[in-house]
Image (cartoon, grey):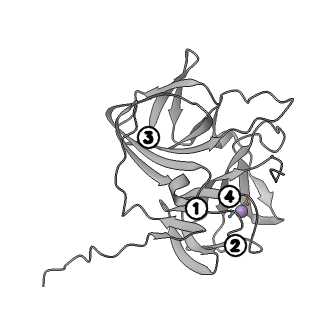
Amino acid sequence: MDQIKLTALSHTVVESDHAVITGDGFVNSVVPGWTNCVVNVVINEAMGANFCQLLITMEEAGKLTGKTKASQIFFYVLEGGCTVKIDGQETKLKKGSYVYIPIDKAYVFDQAILDTKLLTFHKVYEKLDAYEVPATLIGHESDIEQTIYCDDPDLLMQNLLPDMTDLSFDMAVNIFTYNPGANLPFVETHIMEHGLIYLAGQGIYRLADKWYPIKKGDSIWMAPYCPQWFGALGKEPAAYIYYKNVNRFPTIV
Ligand code: UGY
Ligand code: MN
């Protein structure tokens, strides 16, 4: 018998304080200045978030030309490779490379391997008195030390930006790796907001009072104070790269 695909089904969930975006519902956006690429706005203000997370696939002759304004942008190479030009300096990027572009800075990404996939996090920069705006920063995840998280050697954290030691940064981007069977030691509930995408593995995420099976490629938004917990399943480590707002006064009053 012919199998009929039920097109009304999706694992994507959007709630007021969290979202799980599996990609099956993506509809592409056009971004002025970004040519020959497919752009999906995974998380942004329209959802209730205070930051933006995109997925970009660079096609034949794909090129991103732009200048940051009020928002800084963090780019991470999920697959493939390309070149970035900033301040007349050209740097080759490969899978695992990242580029932090501060406010008010022109950039060009091009010379991409076909179907290069980039992740971005965008946040309006909040300047701190007596601190300079951070400079452009280019790095690779393999150069970042893995540190033990919450005294559990099966929970490994990499801080891609120096936000722990440099208060001029108001955002953190970390890679969090869980060895098989590892889990967060408690249900976190905090003012900081998160956006993430899974780089590897699978497991169960608790968001608010719901439980979701999650795997490589899925994205999650967690609003401030959304209770959160994750446990890794399967035989390979689970890892996600995530955004967090940090280092600023906690109230406007
Ligand atoms: O940094 C964090 O808040 C992190 N442990 N949260 C999370 O992975 N959901
Ligand atoms: Mn958290």
Q: Quadrant of the N terminus?
A: bottom left
Tell whether 17 sits left or right of 152: left
Circle 3 residues within 10 Å: few <14, some 14–19, many ≥20: some
User: Where 15 falls versus 87 (above or below)?
Assistant: below
Q: How far apart in space, not on screen, are marks 2 and 3 (Cα)?
A: 34 Å
x and y percent of residue 167 in the render? 82, 39
Q: Which amino acid does label 3 sit on?
A: Gly
Pinpoint residue 173: horizontal percent, then vertical percent: 67, 47
Q: Is residue 176 left or right of residue 233?
A: right
The residue that mark 2 highlights is 227
**Residue 80 tag number:** 3
Residue contact at pointers 1 and 4, CB within 8 angstroms: yes
First in sequence: mark 3 vs mark 4: 3
Kind of residue indicated by mark 1: Trp
Q: Earlier in the sequence, mark 2 or mark 3?
A: 3
Q: Reading the chain from its start, which is encountered first: label 1 or label 4?
A: 4
Closer-to-camera residue (99/203): 99
User: Circle 4 sits on which residue?
Assistant: 193
Q: Distance between the residues labelled 2 and 1?
A: 12 Å
Look at the numbered disc 3 and say if its residue's Cβ is closer than 8 Å to ligand 1: no
Residue type at mark 4? Glu
**Sequence-wise first label, 1 or 3:** 3
Q: Which residue corresponds to the image point at 55% horizontal and 49% vertical from the top-left?
A: 52
Q: Which structural element holds mark 3?
A: loop
**Which residue corresponds to mark 1?**
221
Residue 209 vertical position relative to residue 119 in the rendered view, above or below: below
Q: Which of marks 2 and 1 is nearer the N terminus?
A: 1
